[in-house]
Image (cartoon, rainbow, N blue to C red):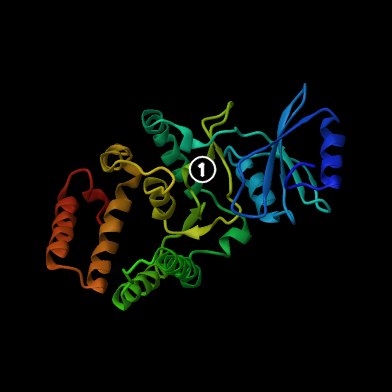
């Protein structure tokens, strides 16, 4: 028996792909999901086995595929066995790229984010967003994990009440942000497969929701799985004019955050000076907001 499967699931796989098909476990998820690469003499596909099939994943796979986003295509589902049969997107993800190759591919990821943000998503995505409840859940989970880390390694450093208050105030501010777009929510290098047929295959999009335009961009620029050199982040998208309005919007938010967090006057002066300069700059003044 293959780990992560039962006899009925193996029988289903062999009935679809042939009794002599190869079943190769792929990288395990931090969840109940298990993925297997299936090969025979005619094809190469992936089987996902879970306790229950995630309908949001299936619906979003169809939606994104219809809108020209490269995602796994669903070929068959068996709800009683928790099985999805889908196209093979690649065995390696973008975390396996060398930095020079990653830098070459990176503009395509920025274009992908921009394309996702133009989509008119299904109602179940529109009806959920990064509101204060969701943002607080994620920040509180971070604090919870930090406390567990602190206890395990006997760390003395604590998060101050002032820092926690600042996080809560920031969450409240983001909750009121008036521009919300389709957000993948987990846009990092391990959710981008190196496809033999396309520039990428995007996965793990089932939790997509409405969020601020900068969310996915920040996720990939400050990717914990692929830390980028600072100079890389500074120049990687220097000619993407579509993000210029976001720069000014970010500065406006940063000014508010500095005031809420009561940071030093020198930081406030820097942000205000940069705002004033960009508002007069020939490449940015048209986006003055």
Q: Is residue 289 visible?
A: no
Label 1's element? helix
Position above or below: 39 against 238: above
Rendered-image quadrant of the N terminus: top right
Above-or-below relation of 137 to 126: below
Residue at 48% over, 65% down: 138
Q: Residue at x 82, y 32 (%)?
A: 17
User: Does the image show residue 254?
Assistant: yes
Above or below, 172 against 237 in this view is below
Q: Identify the residue at horizontal 33%, vertical 71% (top origin).
A: 158
Where is mark 1, residue-wise?
Answer: 190
Residue 217: x %, y % from top left: 40, 49
Q: Quick one: 212 or 47, which is closer to the camera?
A: 47
Question: Closer to the camera, 280 or 217?
Answer: 217
Position of residue 76 in the picture relative to residue 211 (left or right) = right
Name the image quarter holding residue 128: bottom right
Residue 257 in percent (x, y) is at 27, 67
| Quarter residue 169 falls in | bottom left
Left or right of 235 in this view: 53: right
Q: Nearer the viewer, residue 105 or 127?
A: 105
Q: Quadrant of the C terminus?
A: bottom left
Q: Is 122 placed left or right of 253 in the picture?
A: right
Question: How many residues crowd mark 1 within 10 Å: few (<14), some (14–19), many (20+)?
Answer: some
Residue 57 position within the rendered picture, expressed as x and y whole percent measured from the top left:
66, 51
Residue 213, image x and y in percent? 41, 54
Q: Residue at x 34, y 46 (%)?
A: 243
Residue at the far top: name it. 41
């Amino acid at each position: 028996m293959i780990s992560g499967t039962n006899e009925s699931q193996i029988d289903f796989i062999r009935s679809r792909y042939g009794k002599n098909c190869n079943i190769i476990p792929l990288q395990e998820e931090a969840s109940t999901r298990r993925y297997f690469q299936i090969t025979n003499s005619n094809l190469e596909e992936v089987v996902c086995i879970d306790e229950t099939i995630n309908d949001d994943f299936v619906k979003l796979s169809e939606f994104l595929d219809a809108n020209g986003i490269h995602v796994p295509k669903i070929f068959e589902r068996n709800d009683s066995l928790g099985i999805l049969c889908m196209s093979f997107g690649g065995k390696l993800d973008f975390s396996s790229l060398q930095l020079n190759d990653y830098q070459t591919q990176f503009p395509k990821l920025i274009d992908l984010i921009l394309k996702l943000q133009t989509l008119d998503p299904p109602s179940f995505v529109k009806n959920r967003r990064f509101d204060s409840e969701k943002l607080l859940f994620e920040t509180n989970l971070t604090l919870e994990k930090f406390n567990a880390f602190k206890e395990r390694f006997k760390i003395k450093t604590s998060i101050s009440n002032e820092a926690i208050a600042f996080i809560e105030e920031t969450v409240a501010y983001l909750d009121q942000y008036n521009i919300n777009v389709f957000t993948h929510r987990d846009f990092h290098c391990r959710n981008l497969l190196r496809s033999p047929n396309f520039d990428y295959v995007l996965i793990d999009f089932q939790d997509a929701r409405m969020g601020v335009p900068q969310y996915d961009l920040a996720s990939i620029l400050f990717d914990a799985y692929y830390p980028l050199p600072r100079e890389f982040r500074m120049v990687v998208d220097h000619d993407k004019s579509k993000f210029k309005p976001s720069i000014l919007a970010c500065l406006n938010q940063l000014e508010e955050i500095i005031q809420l967090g009561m940071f030093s006057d020198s930081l406030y002066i820097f942000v205000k000076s940069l705002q004033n300069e960009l508002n007069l700059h020939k490449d940015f003044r048209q986006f003055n907001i």
